[in-house]
Image (spheres, rainbow, N blue to C red):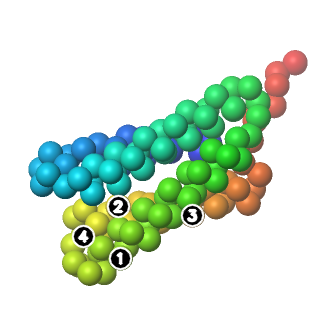
C-alpha cells in the first residue's frame, strides 16, 4: 500500500476534526492544530501521489507525514493522559500512532514501490 492512499483520507479527517472542534467549541487551538495539520498532511499526500505518478519517491513527503503524525500522537496522547477521554484525544492519538508506525515502515522499506511495467 502506498503512503498517499492513507495520507489523503487521514489528512481530511484531521482537517475536518479541527474545523468541527472550532465550530463546536470555538477552539482556535483545534482550528490551528487540526486544520493546519490536516492541510500539511493533504499537501504531503498530494506531493507523494504526484511523485509516484512520475515513478519517483518523495522522501520529503514521507518525512513530513511522519513528523506531523508523530506530533499529533504526542500532543493528543498527552491530552488523553490528562483527560482520559477516548473521544477525541484517545482516538486521534491511536490513529496517529498507527500512521506514524506506517510511515516509519515506508521509510525503512524504501518508500513507495512501483509495479513492474508490462512489456
Task: Estimate the spatial distance between the alpha carbons at disc 3 and disc 2, rounded to whole Å.
Answer: 14 Å
Question: How many neighbours does mark 2 have within 10 angstroms: few (below 14), some (14-19), or many (20 or more)?
Answer: many
Q: Quadrant of residue 92?
A: bottom left
Q: For this view, does 71 lie left or right of residue 49?
A: left
> From the viewer's perspective, is the residue at label 1 or at label 2 nearer?
1
Q: Earlier in the sequence, mark 3 or mark 2?
A: 2
Left or right: 42 with respect to 64? left
Q: Say which residue label 2 marks.
A: 92
> How far apart, in angstroms, are the residues tagged by discs 4 and 3?
20 Å
Q: Nearer the viewer, mark 1 or mark 3?
A: 1
Write down the residue under mark 3. 101
State which tag comes first along the sequence, 4 or 3.
4
Q: Earlier in the sequence, mark 4 or mark 2?
A: 4
Q: Nearer the viewer, mark 1 or mark 4?
A: 1
The quarter of the rendered structure image containing the N terminus is: top right
Q: Secondary structure at mark 1?
A: helix
- Identify the mark nearer the N-term, 1 or 4: 1
The answer to whether residue 13 is visible is no
Element carrying mark 4: helix
Task: Measure the alpha-carbon separation of dots 1 and 4.
Answer: 12 Å
Q: Residue at x 24, y 70 (%)?
A: 86
- Residue 89 location (% of width, % of height): 29, 66
Residue 96: give x, y in percent of width and height: 44, 60
* Location of mark 1 (residue): 78
Q: Which residue is under mark 4?
A: 86
User: Is disc 4 in contact with disc 2, using a CB cutoff of under 8 Å?
Assistant: no
Amino acid at each position: 500500500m502506498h503512503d498517499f492512499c492513507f495520507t489523503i483520507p487521514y489528512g481530511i479527517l484531521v482537517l475536518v476534526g479541527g474545523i468541527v472542534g472550532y465550530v463546536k467549541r470555538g477552539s482556535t487551538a483545534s482550528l490551528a492544530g487540526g486544520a493546519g495539520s490536516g492541510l500539511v498532511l493533504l499537501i504531503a499526500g498530494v506531493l507523494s501521489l504526484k511523485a509516484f505518478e512520475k515513478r519517483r519517491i518523495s522522501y520529503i513527503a514521507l518525512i513530513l507525514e511522519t513528523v506531523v503524525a508523530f506530533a499529533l500522537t504526542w500532543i493528543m496522547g498527552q491530552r488523553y493522559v490528562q483527560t482520559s477521554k477516548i473521544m477525541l484525544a484517545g482516538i486521534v492519538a491511536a490513529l496517529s500512532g498507527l500512521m506514524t508506525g506506517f510511515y516509519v515502515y515506508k521509510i525503512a522499506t524504501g518508500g513507495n514501490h512501483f509495479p513492474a511495467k508490462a512489456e
